[in-house]
Image (cartoon, rainbow, N blue to C red):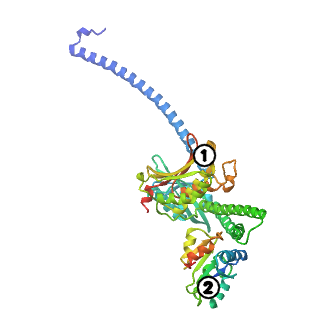
Amino acid sequence: MTITRTNPRALVVDDDESIRSVVDIALGLVGGFDVTQAASGEEAVELLTDRIFDVVVLDVMMPGLDGPGTLQRIRSTYNGVDVPVVFLTAKAQPHERRDLESLGASGVIVKPFDPLTLADDVRSLASLDS
Amino acid sequence: MAPDLYSLTSSSRWMILIVTVGIATVSALSARIWSIERSHRRIRSVLEKRVFLRTKELERAYEMTEHVVNAVKEAIVVVDPHGEAVLVNPAAQAMLEIDRSSDDSRQICRVFNERFPDLRIFMREHVEGASGKTSITIRTDVSGRRRVLEVLGTPLDGPDEGHVYIVRDITDALSFLEMKSRFVSIVSHEIRTPLTSLSGSLDLLDEGVLGALPDRAADLVSIARSSTDRLVRLVNDVLDLDRLESQRLTLSPTWVSIDELFVETLRTMQPFSTKHGVRLLADSANGHLNGKVFVDQDRIVQVLLNLVLNAIKFAPASSTILVSARRRHDEVEFRVDDEGRGVPQSELESIFEPFTQIETTDDRRDSGTGLGLAICRGIVERHGGRIWAEKRVPTGTRFVFTIPHERQETNP
């Protein structure tokens, strides 16, 4: 028998359902991730208390707990202490990008993103083996 | 009996002679004095008349000046060589809400000097030459309302050297600009979210990730995809232009090698130029340059990409586009030369205005937003440079932009 390789597990957090769907297909169908969706920062934090993910793809502007707030809370959960977090944002200014990176994110991907390369981009930013 | 002169002694004769000569002299002198006096009187009356007329003229000129200064809607403040206000015209009094019931100009100046210390400091420093600025924007309190004032100063020539200042209240203009900018920013971000899922979905469908589509469906998806791409570029360009216009575009300059700028530009544009059968070359003329400029790399590459993209759009097949740089005086001059049919003389300047496009006969026009060159100009000017287009002989267009060199060495 060959060794079965498990797919990397991604948690996709975005309040916009249509974006979650596109990211899901881009990471899952195109990129071979196992994708779990969360519609809010609160839901993401809850999921991370008892499940392990290899990467969190996190929207920045969300009602309630926003991206930076969610990142802070993720770091205080048991499974989220050092999980790589990649921001997905419509704010593309270099200083906005630097601000997000300085919060302890592994990288920033700007909307609109290319769904065909998204999985590769997430992999390389989060330093996951492909 | 008539006196016999000969019978007089010789001394008496002398006496009479002297007296006679004396009388003659005196009468001649007095006649002269009288005539001098008369001409003096005449001259004096002429002079008096002239002085009177000249004074009247000066008075009229002064009244005219005063009238103009009082009548204009521009707020004017004149200061003496020590930076003290000596004139605050009614428009300035109204703008700064200085009590206008007083006619005493010295009282008005005193109120001005006391109530607007920051304005006064600027004017004093300006008059003394401490600040190189000729204009300043000041946020100040006018009767409890926050106002933004723009002050422009000009030195006065002449014996009473001082400065004259025009004060403009730009509060409303600024808040309008801020409002517009906020609007553009919100709309762009709001558009970007649905655009992300739209373009993402179309990309996935078009690439057959979910299986092959029927031919006609694939055509439609492909059309929708390229239109969406154009919409994305438009939103990005509108945001860029707005940031440039509202001065909110932050540059992150570093020392960048010109070669690196060219390599990045060529690498990105090569597929597009190959597709159109156009040769793309770069010459950084390193022998004449120290090879580096202090710029925001991403933004200058954006300018170069835009210029090269434009050139490719208008370039005939198998023509050459040359990207080059050279040092000229205190600047580094970047050039993009093409062999296209050229921009009409009348449009060489207007092409840098937003939403202008040069008419093309083929479908390549569709890929532009009409904002590219306006953004290029904005970016170059934020770097302290200039940008323009020239006609090339016999055919083609040369786009040139400059980056000041000396200025940068003071703040690397």
Q: Report, in whole angstroms, how far the alpha carbon at label 1 lies from the one at label 2.
A: 58 Å
Image point 54% across, 36% down: which residue? Answer: B53
Q: Is residue B95 left or right of residue B25?
A: right
Relative to B342, say whether B179 is above or below. Answer: below
- Chain under disc 1: B
* Quarter of the rendering occupied by the C terminus of chain B: bottom left
Q: Which residue is mark 1?
A: B340
Percent x, y of residue B399: 55, 49
Q: Which residue is mark 2?
A: A4
Relative to B38, say whether A65 is above or below. Answer: below
Relative to B68, say whether A58 is above or below. Answer: below
Nearest the viewer among B316 and B244 is B316
Percent x, y of residue A112: 65, 69
Image point 57% across, 54% down: which residue? Answer: B308
Badge 1 and badge 2 both on one subunit: no
Image point 56% across, 87% down: which residue? Answer: A81
* Quarter of the rendering occupied by the N terminus of chain B: top left
